[in-house]
Amino acid sequence: MEVGAVFRAAFALVVGLDPDFLGIVGLSLRVTLTAVAVAAVVGLPLGAALALARFPGRSAIIVCLNALMGLPPVVAGLAVFLLLSRSGPLGPLGLLFTPTAMIVAQVILVLPIVIALTRQVIEDLWGEYRDHLRSVGLEGMRAIPTLLWDGRFSLATALLAGFGRASAEVGAVLIVGGNIAGYTRTMTTAITLETSKGDLPLALGLGIVLLSLTLAINAVAFGASRIGARYAG
Amino acid sequence: MLDATSILPLTVDAVAFAGDGRLLLEPNSFVIPAGGVTVLLGPNGAGKSLTLRLCHGLLNPSRGAVRWADAAGGQRAARRQAKRHAMVFQKPIMLRRSVEANIAHALAASGAEPTTRKSRTGQALARFGLAERAAQPARLLSGGEQQRLAIARAWALRPELLFLDEPTSQLDPAATRQIEELLSGLVSEGITVVMSTHDLGQARRLADRVLFLHRGRLVEDAPGAQFFAGPQSAEARAFLAGELLW
């Protein structure tokens, strides 16, 4: 098939709102957004606590987190696979090859990014706010809610970085999800499969949607943070 | 306005501070009774900010003690009890929120109930001429307005004593004059003011009492008029003569 025909077929798929196609897009979004949400709920307070706390081994934790930001997705996938496989410690839960397993794997990928970037943002903000917050009686962990709220526009970027990592990766969801059609097939695993099968229009169509979604989410986040930054000064 | 038990006088008893193995503040002692403006005067690096921070409890003295008449009021016996002395910094620290929310946040942090928060925020906005700016982002105010908000925010906490660290050093003469008028107003309300400055003119205009510091040592403690008419120490004479000493 020549390239022009591939593009025409791909656009037809995107515009035609094919149910299988939409199912793949929907599952991808569900898995990735859930993973980012979980990572945000856990990672924002943890990152802020790490920014304020002083204890032996803190530097080692920060170095590890920074290293984990570059954790290869296939390794994260493998770890979750071993954990959830029939003979693994969490095997009885029967989660392997389910969307839940994919969410777990992506949380592992996103969490270090959210914690590490949150720590950086909150540490800078604390440097600026410290005197005032301590003066009004917000010492230690009691300062966290204020700092998270006032850092919200910078922290949105941290979550966005997490979303980017989760939506783009294929290794982890492929290993723990199994790429089962209609159940655990995401945009990235489908692109991998269809490309190797030679079904280029489907692969390309999904690629276009993936790119557009990423672009749209980034545009919205950028606009929101611009408005917010103007407001917050 | 104030509770029956006062946190004043504040007693600074041989308070010294060391950092990085160097003695930054020698053991200094003085007492701050209720009322008036006490000015900490001295060249840069004399230990003025350090003294204020130690008094306010942002730093712990290496030696000696800072004592309030009513220990409960001064030290915040319960976690959620406000400590009745507040501080305004050289560079106003403005939260990334509206003018109104900056005041409400400080009140919430020091344990005020929501209804109290609302009424005191309104009073502070009106008292300091910020009502029209209530909804604006605090960080977009001018330097003078930011310092005015910082003072309003501290005032809303109903302090008996207000510490100010070089509150006008980054402001133009007009804004400086405005802040000085505000401070005089606070004193006539019965709030005790302890501030640092290296601005001689400002010290002359405001000081009821001068604590002159030089290289971490309290060199002279005298009523304002007396200090400016005839300083006792060689260091203070040199400082007043404009011979910068360090």
Image: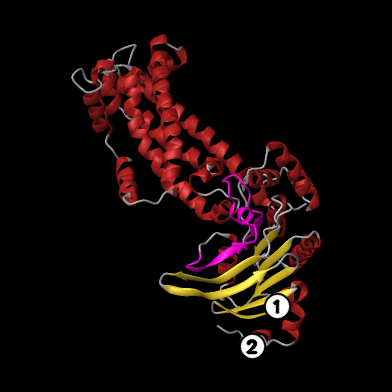
**Are marks 1 and 2 in one subunit?**
yes
Q: Which residue is label 2 attached to?
A: B233
In the rendered image, residue A223 lying in the magenta stretch gets the answer no
Side (left or right) of A228 relative to A94: right
Position of residue B173 measured from the top left corner of the image (x, y, whole percent):
75, 69
Q: Please tell me whether mark 1 sits on a helix, a strand or a loop.
A: helix
Q: Amino acid at mark 1?
A: Leu
Relative to B137, is A91 above or below? above
Q: Which residue is label 1 attached to?
A: B200
The N terminus of chain A sits in image quarter: top left
Residues shaded magenta: B61-90
Q: Which mark is residue B232?
A: none
Q: Please tell me whether mark 2 sits on a helix, a strand or a loop.
A: loop
- The chain containing the residue under callout 1 comes to B
Instruction: Please give the name of the residue rendered at 62% of the width and 73% of the height, measured from the top-left corner.
Output: B30
Side (left or right) of A214 relative to B198: left
- The chain containing the residue under callout 2 comes to B
Relative to A10, is A115 above or below? below
Dividing the picture into quadrants, the one containing residue A37 is: top left
Position of residue A18 measured from the top left corner of the image (x, y, whole percent):
42, 11
